[in-house]
Image (tube, helix red, strand yellow):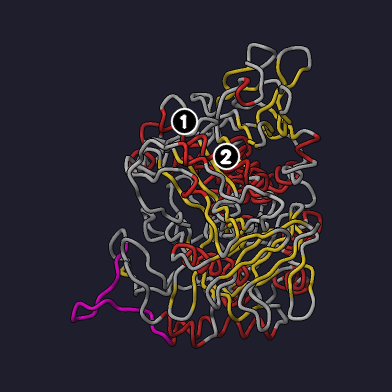
């Protein structure tokens, strides 16, 4: 989400008049102030402020930025921070994020005046301030680190939410928060742990010294009529320790009442169900049957689930509590059956357990639905007709692939949704570099079959976009490869991709700027468990804790033979559940719901960027106005009720100790009105 930008004005020294109170002198006579639901961000360009901004962006919280590096930035004074609307004092910001406790620099007259204006505003309207990153010292309510504290590297350090944190903004966390330590070669985290002084309440602390003492890493400092959340470790938007704490930082800042909402999502699509997958050739370092496999040859010994694998998948689902999306190719399964004597225990088992899974159309036989491929060259190119025009898979062929697979599923009683589709290899959509545009026949075929949500590859197209009347649903590929059924095969192919040519790899990692070479080949006997599983767990869990709803995708081959997918999934689930309380469960949406979530986010972001959202709190009433047809994400405390025409109803759904929802005005209303609990 883009920040709500501010007009630029030349910074000048502030006169004493900037500290004038924004409310009448007699507080008793003053009406309750209006507090706008926007966060003020004072940005120094550092990683800590950027990380908090990323949380605001990702969850839909509007914010306004003052760029400290911009010489033409506005002056932060009383007029910038507050005014009067219809005779009522207005606080323009519900919370303030600053780099540290001295945001404007008290060593200059101008900076001291801006600090004073900001702090007076916070006292007047009870506005909270987050000090994004600072050091441990009495100015923030902490002892110096040489008095029973610690200063230094935090890689791999353990920390824990205190009783006050669990009873306050971090109540959604259960277990210890361990700082990342992904590489022994670099320092990833540095910080200060200080002992609290009077007025300081620690929310997250860590062991210090040898005597069982603990010191604060995050806490609240109440002083001089103000409240600051003091963070004393460095972080960036990608680090897990920040991602799991980000929700609590925003909830503390906004006092639990804000636009935007946050959930943790995890959905897994299993492609090619019923079909076999080709097997990686560890000798030739390619996959027979693929266009670029030197030496040619057809697939042999393909990988396909058995009935026992299907039984295991159903049992795993029941024990794990996670439902898999079976992305299926019925025609490929029928071809397999015909080639193997007309019987297929796998299909029989999956159909018997049909109600335990979700099912998504993957086309009937998994053909490439983009341009007609010319495979006489490597890499392949789009074939052309005599006039030099690209030859495309026809609308009728695409449509029949979608229709035939859907009709088969309906006949077999699978609980499919016509609106969801995953094409083979995401084909039909543009495929760079060979096919820089969608198949022009794709949109029509989707409309013919009522498809509204078509999967795309997030590594190629991370943003949702239109394909005719349908919208894409980007999916995260997992590095558990489609052409591997054993851990040794997986490690061998991983070595080929991620080791240098000198170490026997392809050298792709040396020429691709987005890749990194392994320091040496993995042991094929242990490399999958020791390196790949932890790596893929970290990546997937990173998406989850960032609130990314996009599904992950793998293949049926990964549920076959050695069932190599399960260790990754088990680790993701175990790590998540060890971190988070039962009040913040994983959300496991299906494709259409993920598409709807992304669609709503895009519409909300546009409304914010266009300045068409108005939201504020007066006393115990919250009012939100957005463009017609745009749902607003709102988070509020338990006990909040939504105003209906003649009554009220419980607002939203419970998550992480709060109530939240995408919501719109009720019948005959022009705005959303929420009544907060006393």
- Residue 565 is left or right of residue 516, and the answer is right
Depth check: give the residue in front, 101 or 264. 101
Depth check: give the residue in front, 444 or 428. 444
Q: Is residue 298 above or below residue 347?
A: above
- The prevailing secondary structure element of the residues shown in magenta is loop
Are the residues at dot 2 and dot 1 in contact (C-beta closer than 8 Å)?
A: no
Instruction: Give the extent of the magenta segment.
Output: 380-395
Whole-number angstrom distance, CA of label 2 to CA of label 1: 12 Å
Write down the residue under mark 1.
112
Q: Is residue 412 above or below residue 167?
A: below
Q: Which circle's residue, 2 or 1, is located before the other in the chain? A: 1
- Residue 515 is left or right of residue 119, and the answer is left
Q: Is residue 568 among the parts visible in the rendering? A: no
Depth check: give the residue in front, 496 or 240. 240
Badge 2: few (under 14), some or many (20 or more) residues near its Cα, within 10 Å? Answer: many
> Which residue is pictured at 59% across the width and 56% down the height?
89
Q: State the image coordinates of residue 28 (x, y, percent, origin top left).
A: 72, 51
> Which residue is pictured at 59% across the width and 63% down the height?
615
Depth check: give the residue in front, 667 or 309. 667
Residue 120 badge: 2
Q: State the image coordinates of residue 637 (x, y, percent, origin top left).
A: 75, 56
Q: Secondary structure at mark 1?
A: helix
């Amino acid at each position: 989400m883009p920040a709500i930008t501010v007009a630029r004005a030349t910074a000048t020294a502030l006169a004493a008049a900037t500290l004038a109170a924004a409310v009448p002198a007699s507080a008793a006579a003053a009406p309750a102030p209006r507090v706008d639901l926007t966060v003020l961000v004072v940005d120094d360009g550092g990683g800590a402020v950027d990380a908090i901004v990323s949380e605001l962006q990702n969850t839909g919280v509007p914010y306004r930025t003052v760029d400290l590096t911009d010489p033409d930035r506005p002056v932060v004074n009383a007029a910038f921070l507050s005014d009067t609307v219809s005779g009522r004092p207005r606080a323009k910001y519900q919370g303030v994020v600053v780099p540290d406790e001295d945001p404007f620099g008290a060593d200059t007259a101008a900076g001291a005046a801006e600090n004073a204006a900001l702090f007076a505003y916070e006292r007047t309207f009870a506005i909270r301030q987050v000090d994004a990153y600072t050091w441990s010292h009495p100015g923030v309510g902490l002892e110096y680190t040489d008095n029973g504290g610690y200063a230094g590297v935090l890689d791999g350090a353990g920390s824990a939410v205190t009783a006050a944190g669990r009873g306050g903004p971090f109540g959604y966390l259960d277990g210890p928060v361990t700082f990342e330590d992904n590489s022994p070669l670099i320092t990833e985290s540095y910080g200060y742990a200080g002992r609290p002084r009077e007025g300081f309440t620690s929310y997250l602390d860590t062991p210090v010294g040898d005597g069982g003492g603990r010191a604060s890493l995050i806490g609240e400092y109440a002083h001089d009529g103000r409240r600051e959340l003091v963070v004393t470790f460095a972080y960036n938007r990608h680090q897990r320790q920040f991602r799991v704490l980000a929700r609590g930082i925003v909830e503390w800042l906004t006092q639990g009442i804000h636009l935007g909402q946050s959930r943790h999502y995890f959905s897994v699509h299993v492609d090619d169900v019923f079909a076999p997958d080709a097997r990686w050739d560890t000798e030739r370092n390619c996959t027979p049957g693929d266009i670029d496999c030197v030496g040619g040859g057809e697939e042999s010994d393909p990988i396909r689930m058995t009935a026992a694998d299907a039984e295991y998948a159903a049992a795993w689902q029941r024990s794990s509590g996670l439902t898999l999306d079976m992305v299926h190719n019925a025609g490929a399964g029928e071809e397999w059956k015909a080639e193997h004597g007309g019987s297929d225990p796998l299909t029989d088992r999956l159909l018997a357990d049909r109600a335990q899974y979700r099912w998504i159309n993957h086309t009937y036989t998994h053909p490439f639905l983009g341009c007609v491929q010319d495979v006489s060259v490597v890499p392949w190119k789009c074939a052309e007709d005599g006039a030099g025009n690209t030859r495309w898979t026809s609308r009728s062929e695409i449509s029949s692939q979608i229709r035939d697979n859907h009709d088969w599923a309906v006949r077999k009683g699978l609980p499919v949704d016509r609106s969801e589709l995953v094409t083979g290899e995401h084909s039909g959509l543009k495929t760079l570099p060979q096919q820089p545009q969608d198949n022009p026949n794709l949109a029509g075929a989707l409309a013919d079959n009522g498809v509204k949500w078509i999967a795309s590859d997030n590594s190629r197209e991370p943003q949702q976009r239109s394909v005719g009347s349908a919208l894409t649903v980007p999916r995260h590929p997992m590095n558990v490869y489609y052409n591997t059924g054993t851990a040794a095969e997986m490690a061998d192919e991983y070595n080929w991709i991620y080791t240098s040519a000198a170490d026997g790899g392809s050298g792709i990692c040396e020429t691709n700027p987005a890749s990194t070479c392994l320091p040496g080949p993995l042991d094929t006997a242990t490399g999958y468990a020791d390196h790949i599983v932890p790596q893929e767990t970290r990546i997937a869990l990173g998406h989850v804790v960032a609130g990314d709803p996009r599904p992950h995708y793998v293949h049926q081959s990964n549920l076959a033979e050695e069932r190599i997918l399960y260790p990754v999934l088990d680790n993701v689930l175990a790590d998540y559940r060890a971190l988070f309380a039962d009040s913040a469960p994983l959300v496991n949406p299906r494709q259409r719901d993920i598409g709807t979530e992304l669609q709503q986010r895009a519409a909300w972001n546009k409304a914010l960027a266009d300045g068409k959202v108005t939201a504020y709190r007066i006393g115990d009433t919250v009012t939100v106005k957005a463009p017609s047809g745009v749902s607003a994400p709102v988070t509020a405390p338990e006990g909040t009720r939504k105003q209906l025409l003649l009554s009220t109803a419980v607002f939203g759904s419970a998550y992480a100790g709060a109530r939240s929802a995408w919501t719109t005005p009720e019948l005959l209303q022009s705005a959303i009105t929420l009544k907060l609990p006393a």
